[in-house]
Amino acid sequence: MNGMTNVFRNLLYALLFGFASCTSNDRLTPFPGTDYFPLQIGHSSEFDLQRTVYSASELPEIKNYIIRHLIADSFKDLQDHWTYKIEYAVQNGQKSWKTDSFTTVRKTAAELLVQENGQTILTQIYPVSEGTSWNGNCYNSMGEVKFRYTRTGKSYQTKSGIFPKTITIVRQDDSTLLSRSKYIEVYAQNIGLVSVEKIFLQYCSTPDCRGKGIISSGWTERAVIKNFVK
């Protein structure tokens, strides 16, 4: 009887852990790759960000910003998991910081979960491995979106220097005659995010310009790290 009881208990544990996680693996010891998103209060990174907005009737509007990501606080959630609060700020003309928004991040041994626009996004899974893909929306009700790792362990250079070990996450990279969508992030070991590129464009679809890549609307955004404090 005890043997049968143990079988049922183990099965119950497996089901509970399966429903609690979108990935099949979780354990107390972190998998390799969790150091690509370090979580430590006081850790901050500053970025040069350029945003360009397009319309069919006007010239592109280009704006440049300096933004900061700061891990400001931590707390335990209702499930007793450590959750970290990230503060986003923009530098104004007087070089002082104005807080723009907040988000929260939770990292387990196998997953990194980030709140984005009120939705839980599975941003990274561990262990990190070239070509691995997963559903970034598996913790929310939005449609399935495949994220994937590429260029794992490769160096990446910016104006602020060379980062010897990075990973690239492709969230989206689609192109048609009528649109272009791209969302790619680069993370450096022990630093975190160092670059992000977003492109969401609509092309002219009338017979005289279809397929010529003439932008009718949309925007692009690129942020590259300029300095950081661990």
Image (cartoon, helix red, strand yellow):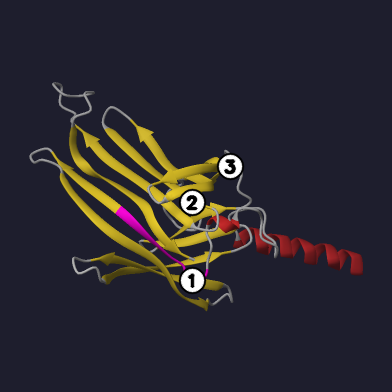
Q: Secondary structure at mark 2?
A: strand
Q: Measured along the vertical axis of the image, is residue 149 above or below residue 88? A: above
Disc 1 to disc 3, how far (Cα)?
26 Å
Q: Measured along the vertical axis of the image, is residue 57 above or below residue 22? A: above
Q: Earlier in the sequence, mark 1 or mark 3?
A: 1
Span highlighted in magenta in the image: 40-48
Depth check, mark 2 against mark 1: the one in front is 2
Image coords of residue 25 (percent x, y): 67, 55
Q: Measured along the vertical axis of the image, is residue 115 above or below residue 143? A: below
Question: Of residues 194 and 202, which is closer to you in this image?
Answer: 194
Q: Quadrant of the N terminus?
A: bottom right
Dot 2 alpha-carbon crowd within 10 angstroms: few under 14, some 14 to 19, many 20 or more:
many
Residue type at mark 1: give it: Tyr
Q: Is residue 1 visible?
A: no
Image coords of residue 167 (percent x, y): 52, 46
Q: Is residue 93 visible?
A: yes
Q: Earlier in the sequence, mark 2 or mark 3?
A: 3
Give the left or right position of residue 133, taking residue 24 as reference.
left
The quadrant holding residue 204 is top left
- For the image, the number of numbered tags is 3
Q: Which residue in the protein does label 3 denote?
A: 132
Identify the residue shown where x is 47% and y is 52%: 137
Q: Which residue in the protein does label 1 denote?
A: 84
Dot 3 alpha-carbon crowd within 10 angstroms: few under 14, some 14 to 19, many 20 or more:
some
Q: Which residue in the protein does label 2 denote?
A: 187
Disc 2 to disc 1, how far (Cα)?
18 Å
